[in-house]
Amino acid sequence: MARKSIAEMSFSKVYPLLVQKAERKGRTRAEVDAACCWLTGYDEAGLARQLERGVTYQEFFDEAPALNPNRALITGKVCGVDVAAIEDPVERCARYLDKLVDELARGKALEKVLRS
């Protein structure tokens, strides 16, 4: 079976896994939502609509109201891959989001996670 690219993956199926990762470490869904909204420019209602529609990562990021210009400040590795070295913009944004949730799960303050 061929492996799906990140762009083809359902965001609404991966989102609960991101929330679970954060909640296992004592963080909240609201904090994960804040990270999603910071990265993409969606408000809470817009994020909920995208989850309800079952969009792919490609659609989620293509339809984002305003990708945060400070997302380039997110550095480090996710799954052993340097996020800054990822060429595909959808995959890079997906990894940025994963990195934000990882930082939350490690106990970093939300303000620092959001590069405020």
Image (cartoon, rainbow, N blue to C red):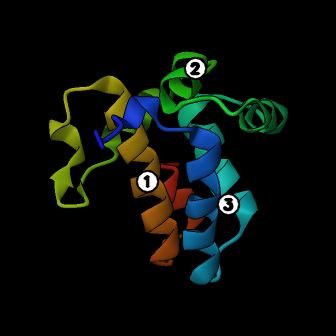
Image coordinates for residue 68, horizontal then vertical, percent: 50, 29
Q: Earlier in the sequence, mark 3 or mark 1?
A: 3
Residue assigned mark 1: 98
Q: Please tell me which residue lies in front, 112 or 64.
A: 64
**Looking at the image, which residue is at 43% across and 26% down?**
69
**Label 2 vs label 1, nearer the camera:** 1
**Looking at the image, which residue is at 30% across and 44% down?**
1
Residue type beneath disc 1? Asp
Residue assigned mark 3: 31
Query: Within the image, what quadrant is residue 49 found in?
Result: top right
**Label 3 vs label 1, nearer the camera:** 1
What label sits on residue 66 in the rendered view? Answer: 2
Residue type beneath disc 2? Ala
Q: Are marks 2 and 1 in contact (CB under 8 Å)?
A: no
**Disc 2/disc 1 C-alpha distance (Å):** 18 Å
* Element at label 1: helix
Binning the other alpha carbons within 10 Å of mark 3 as few (below 14), some (14 to 19) or many (20 upward) gives some
**Disc 3/disc 1 C-alpha distance (Å):** 13 Å
Q: Residue furthest front?
A: 1
Question: Is residue 51 shown left or right of residue 94?
Answer: right
In the image, residue 58 above or below residue 21: above
Q: Earlier in the sequence, mark 2 or mark 3?
A: 3
